Image: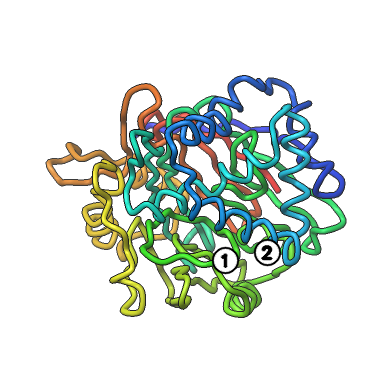
Amino acid sequence: MIVAIEEGQARELRGDAWQRGRAQASAPGSDAARVAAATVARVIEARRAGVFDDRALSYLAAQRRFVEENDPHSLAEVSGIAEGFGMKVDDLFAHLHMRIVGDLGEGATLDGAPLDGDGCSAFALGAGRDGPLVAKNRDFSGAHLGIQTVFRHSGPDIATGSMLCVGSLGSPGAYSSGMNARGLMLADTQIGARTHRVGWLRYFLMTRVLARCSDVAEALAFIRSVPHAGGGSLILADAAGAVAGVELGAASVAVEEGERVLRTNHFLSEELARDTLPPDDDRIAANSEQRLAFLSHRLPALTGEVAEAMELMARHTDDAGEPAPVCQHAQGADAQTLSSVVYSGRDRCLYFHEGTPCLGKWKRFAL
């Protein structure tokens, strides 16, 4: 695979959390209609279809109270985003909880309102030729094509100095992955869960970990100390080469530490494996085990070069006759690989590819 790398310019978001959220709408190229279509329009559609029943509404209300008490910065950022793009805060808050609402209904389709497919493959290497790395393919609704971007956050609530995050316009902080100025890197994967409770939403948790934690040890201590809404996993690495995979359950948190960790879209730990919600008709979630098997076979042989990680994330099922659905294609708004990212803790930068990484058009963003 031929790889072209250009220098990229991150969107600068400065100030307190509300100001950073509000600033998204004034960034060059921000399209309010497109952002609304990828976020609150899905909530409005689901509401019309009756997805937000009494159980869902009660849960969202309890979550709102929890965030107000435990994570006011994230709520302020969401409020700023909503004001900037002319959306309702309640709708945007509900959008961020749509996967949990889907899990509460135990299915990817609720009363005729399909939820966006959501997958992702992520891994971390603690050592290698290019230093500690975190890599992720973001598999999500095609509605987010064109609104993905790289943000640089700085503000009084970010104790680690600054954060470089891959996310989407209309969504807060590290909505997909990120790194901070101390060299801590993280990425998430979606895992549908049978069990949820009131607690930290993964998207808010990721931002707060980067804002307050300098290394993997601090991040794990914080994650273990708080209740979680449940669902999903985190991959973490720091500049010193510490690596961890964290599965976020409502009842417990399962941590794997080692030189190399990997997660796709199902729980692996003994504590949480039975809590994985079957993928039903979600095509990407359904090939989670196949992706895990392929990447598990390839990971031990990696030398830790950035280019090597890029090539691995660009693999298809039909490459060399080996089943490897890592780079996933689809049409229109269907779930697909929207982007790929490789973080380098040594060089304090990320390499970002919008669209399927098999195209080989990467951009480098320095922290």
> Residue 157: which quarter of the image?
bottom right
> Residue 220: which quarter of the image?
bottom right
Q: Which residue is mark 2?
A: 66
Q: Position of residue 114 (x, y in %)?
A: 36, 35
**As displayed, is residue 214 above or below residue 7?**
below
Amino acid marked by disc 1: Val
Which residue is at the front of the view, 278 or 305? 278
Whether the residues at callouts 1 and 2 have beta carbons within 8 Å, the answer is yes
Identity of the residue drawn at 39% across and 60% down: 303
Q: Position of residue 254 (x, y in %)?
A: 44, 76
Furthest-left residue in this view: 321
Which residue is at the front of the view, 250 or 172? 250
Q: Position of residue 263 (x, y in %)?
A: 37, 61
The CA distance from mark 1 to mark 2 is 7 Å
The numbered mark, 1 or 2, whose residue comes first in the sequence reads: 2
Secondary structure of the residue carrying numbered label 1: loop
Amino acid marked by disc 2: Phe
In the displayed structure, does residue 152 sit left or right of residue 323?
A: right
Furthest-front residue in this view: 54
Inspect this view and state whether residue 122 appears. Answer: yes
Q: Which residue is mark 1?
A: 198
In the displayed structure, does residue 158 sit left or right of residue 192?
A: right
**As displayed, is residue 346 above or below residue 21?**
below
Identity of the residue drawn at 50% across and 51% down: 54
In the displayed structure, does residue 6 sit left or right of residue 191?
A: right
Packing grade of label 2 (10 A; few <14, some 14-19, many >=20) is some
Which residue is at the front of the view, 29 or 273? 273
Identity of the residue drawn at 39% across and 54% down: 103
Q: Locate the N terminus and report the quarter of the image it occupies.
A: top left
Identity of the residue drawn at 57% across and 79% down: 224
